[in-house]
Image (cartoon, rainbow, N blue to C red):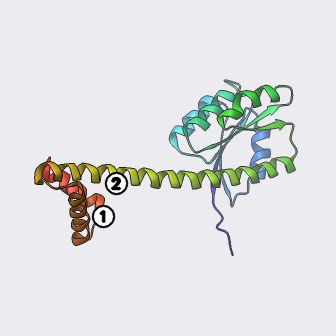
């Protein structure tokens, strides 16, 4: 079995060009599209322009420490936030940011530790992608149920149908027209609005 290789977008946020180059060298060109920013403000602008799978933050930044940025990223998107913090503040940062879903790596870290961490982060991103997909399907199903129920109430009120008959009517209309129940329900709603 051959696994599909995904291409991930990574934003590296650091005031240090050396850090950007070192992390960039660990992100294979075949697997990662890389971008960088020197501080939180620049990173936030880039995040408004496009989405990233990973934001790797080397604290402290030029305009803030980086913990607020990492927590904001984790709270507002499906992006994995990774925060590199020096060992003297590591425990404090873990206590502050880990509950928000931020991954923290203690500096200095060897290339092998960072590579292993990246493998784990990729696994976490794929798991998150799976959860997002399931959530999207659930939201779509809830929306379909909402629209069908609204159409049923129009049929109950305007055609004096029972709820069961209204549901069967929508299913038959969808089948006869070769459309989804949601589409059939939307046509019924438009008719009575």
Question: From where the camera sits, is residue 60 visible?
Answer: no
Quarter of the rendering containing residue 69? top right
Camera-side residue: 176 or 162? 162
User: Which residue corresponds to mark 1?
Assistant: 180
The answer to whether 23 is drawn above or below residue 133 in the figure is: above
Residue 144 rendering spot, x and y as whole percentages: 34, 54
Residue 51 rendering spot, x and y as whole percentages: 55, 45
**Real-space CA distance between mark 1 and mark 2, rounded to the nearest whole angstrom:** 9 Å
Left or right: where 151 falls relative to 105: left
The label on residue 50 is: none
Secondary element type, mark 2 = helix
Q: Residue at the far bottom: name it.
A: 1
Residue at 27% over, 67% down: 179
Left or right: where 73 falls relative to 188: right
The answer to whether 38 is drawn above or below residue 187 in the figure is: above
Q: Are marks 1 and 2 in contact (CB under 8 Å)?
A: yes
Left or right: where 172 falls relative to 53: left
User: Which residue corresponds to mark 2?
Assistant: 144
Camera-side residue: 86 or 143? 143
Secondary element type, mark 1 = loop
Residue 126 rendering spot, x and y as whole percentages: 64, 55
The answer to whether 110 is drawn above or below residue 164 in the figure is: above
Residue at 82% over, 26% down: 89
Residue 122 rendering spot, x and y as whole percentages: 70, 53
Question: From where the camera sits, is residue 175 visible?
Answer: yes
**Could you tell which of marks 1 and 2 lies nearer the N-terminus?**
2
């Amino acid at each position: 079995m051959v696994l599909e290789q995904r291409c991930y977008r990574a934003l590296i946020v650091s005031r240090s060009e050396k850090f950007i180059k070192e992390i960039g060298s660990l992100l294979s060109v075949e697997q990662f599209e890389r971008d960088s920013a020197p501080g939180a403000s620049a990173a936030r602008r880039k995040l408004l322009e496009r989405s990233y799978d990973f934001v790797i933050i080397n604290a402290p930044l030029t305009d803030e420490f980086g913990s607020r940025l990492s927590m904001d990223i984790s709270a507002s998107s499906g992006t994995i936030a990774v925060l590199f913090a020096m060992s003297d503040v590591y425990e404090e940062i873990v206590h502050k940011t880990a509950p928000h879903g931020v991954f923290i790596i203690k500096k200095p870290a060897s290339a092998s530790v960072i590579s292993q961490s990246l493998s784990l982060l990729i696994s976490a991103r794929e798991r998150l992608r799976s959860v997002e997909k399931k959530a999207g399907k659930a939201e779509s199903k809830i929306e379909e149920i909402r629209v069908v129920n609204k159409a049923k109430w129009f049929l109950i009120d305007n055609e004096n149908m029972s709820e069961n008959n209204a549901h069967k009517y929508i299913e038959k209309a969808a089948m006869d027209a070769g459309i989804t129940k949601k589409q059939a329900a939307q046509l019924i709603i438009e008719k009575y609005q």
